[in-house]
Amino acid sequence: MNVEYLPLVFFLIALFYSSVGFGGGSSYLAILSLFLTDFYEIRSTALILNICVVTIGTLVFIRNRVFDMRLFWPFLVMSIPFAYLGAQVRLSQKAFFLVLGSALILAGIFMLLRFLKKTLESKEFSNSKKLVLGGSIGLLSGVSGIGGGIFLSPVLNLLKWANPRIVASLASVFILVNSISGLIGLNMAGTFKLNNELMLQLVVAVVGGGGLGSYLSNKKFNLKFLGVLTSILVLYVGLRLILLHGFGVKI
């Protein structure tokens, strides 16, 4: 794939990911690693694109009254400082992608099993449980250079917390605050780097895709299909990362 096709590819990624409440950070990282040599430039670019996409999604969820701060605040309180700390950890590119891919494959399998059931149950979490989950995934978010929603959403769906649309809205907000925190952490660590010309093209692409995907998420998808779609997406990204960075196989 030539670099001139990147905006179109990123438009489609943003469309697909935003439809399930994600920013697309894991796929941005995977694709950018094929074209850029500086891993910190890759992480910085992915975080900014994440912020662009999930800002749109968050506003749409708020407008459609899906977002509820009373339910969400404990997840966010601990995630923000831990995402900041995680962003300052230096991790090799290969190790990062192998760990990320393995985690996504496991998450995707458990999610798919959950949503293939005939009925979808939901239950409430205590604030302490939300704080622990938010802090743990926030740390992983900062280390990996993505917003963390692609980890949070599978965990919450597996543990049967709320319905997929509410989980998607939380994932969107979670990604937004942790991407901003992670970006600040990269800057403080002196590892924030960008290619401004390429960055501008990709921002325009993901804003367009993210806007359309957020609309579809709130207006067109039924809940079970939303969950199954998320599961398949997580599985594909995890498998792709393992094959590419572990065995050099491109899919």
Image (cartoon, grey):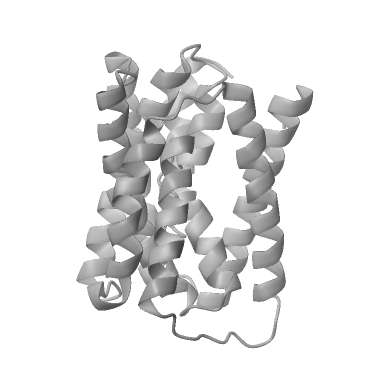
Image height check: is 87 above or below 42? below
Is residue 245 toward the left or the right of residue 39 in the image? right
Question: In the image, what residue occupies the spot 47% across and 51% down?
Answer: 17
Question: In the image, what residue occupies the spot 61% across and 52% down?
Answer: 234
Is residue 181 toward the left or the right of residue 43 in the image? left
Viewer-side residue, 198 vs 158: 158
Examine the rendering and report whether any part of residue 131 can be seen. yes
The percent position of residue 7, horizontal first and vertical second, equals 41, 28
Is residue 25 toward the left or the right of residue 227 in the image? left
Quadrant of residue 194 within the rendered picture: top left
The percent position of residue 80, horizontal first and vertical second, equals 30, 50
Q: Quadrant of the N terminus?
A: top right
The percent position of residue 70, horizontal first and vertical second, equals 25, 77
Image height check: is 210 above or below 240? below
Image height check: is 93 above or below 136? above
Image height check: is 208 above or below 157? above
Quadrant of residue 126 within the rendered picture: bottom left
Q: How many marks?
A: 0
| Residue found farthest to the top | 37
Question: In the image, what residue occupies the spot 52% across and 26% down?
Answer: 91
Q: Quadrant of the C terminus?
A: top right
The percent position of residue 187, horizontal first and vertical second, equals 26, 25
Viewer-side residue, 82 vs 15: 82
